[in-house]
Image (tube, rainbow, N blue to C red):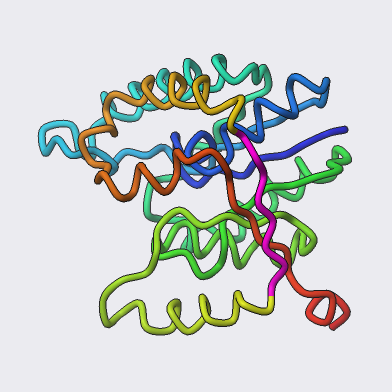
Amino acid sequence: MKVLVISPHPDDETLCCGGSILNHVRRGDKVTVVIVTDGRYGSPSPELRGTEELVELRKKEALMATSKLGVEDVRFLNFEDSKVMINQDKIIKKIASVIGEGQDLIYSPLPMDGHQDHASLGRIMTKLAPTSLFYLIWIPSGLKAHSRRVGLIKLRNWERIEKDIEKFREVKLRALEEYKSQLGGFSGDFLRRLTADHERFYRRPLSALRR
């Protein structure tokens, strides 16, 4: 089986489905991770934020983390962090090219995610690969996220899939530790939700796919 993981930033691939990735690899599946943006603004350190140094650091961290998960095919699209929406036409072409290689299963961020890059990618993927398994990283919060919170209510109509990753959790945690530039920005509740003994995904309802 050929598996594709769409990751908005370096670290999302491990946070959302590190255990599932490891399961695929150990079953002999071919896993490709596509990291869409360069993550240049994602650091709790003001000195690093927005620098080329952070771009290179996050790329190195991603390669170390995915190596621990057994992934050999990691592709960096290198679009600027936080600019998925304005680069969507170019991103669509890049991702469509990878999908054209014949992917059997695709993991994607949800269009209701609280982070704009994730949500924009989710909307792209509902069109490019509507049968993907969709994951949630950032829960919407604040007044500006009202429409996304409404979208989360609609998730009740989506099929929810819980993947047991208990036997892969320790390795997932070791992979996450490679993201040293990010760990200071993760809250306890956030990490607890995304480092549990299961990973949660959503599949669009059949009625939506038939439209």
Quadrant containing the C terminus is bottom right
Q: Main secondary structure of the magenta part?
A: strand
Q: In this rendered view, identify the residue nearer to me: 174 or 45.
A: 174
Residue, far left: 47
Q: In this rendered view, identify the residue nearer to me: 81 or 201.
A: 201
Q: Is residue 149 above or below residue 65?
A: below
Q: In this rendered view, identify the residue nearer to me: 188 or 149.
A: 188
What is the quadrant of residue 142 in the picture? bottom left
**Residue 193 position in % (x across, y down):** 41, 49
In the drawing, does residue 109 fall left or right of residue 179? right
Q: Residue at x 29, y 24 (%)?
A: 180
Q: Is residue 99 above or below residue 78?
A: below
In the drawing, does residue 169 fall left or right of residue 144? right
Q: Is residue 174 above or below residue 165?
A: above
Q: Residue at x 28, y 28 (%)?
A: 54
Q: Which residues are magenta?
A: 158-165
Q: Is residue 54 found inside the magenta-colored segment of the image?
A: no
Q: Residue at x 80, y 45 (%)?
A: 105
Q: Residue at x 70, y 54 (%)?
A: 133
**Residue 49 position in % (x across, y down):** 20, 38
What is the quadrant of residue 11 in the picture? top left
Quadrant containing the N terminus is top right
**Residue 152 position in % (x across, y down):** 51, 75
Q: Is residue 164 found inside the magenta-colored segment of the image?
A: yes
**Residue 146 position in % (x across, y down):** 37, 83
In the drawing, does residue 83 fall left or right of residue 153? left
Q: Is residue 53 above or below residue 84?
A: above
Q: How many marks?
A: 0
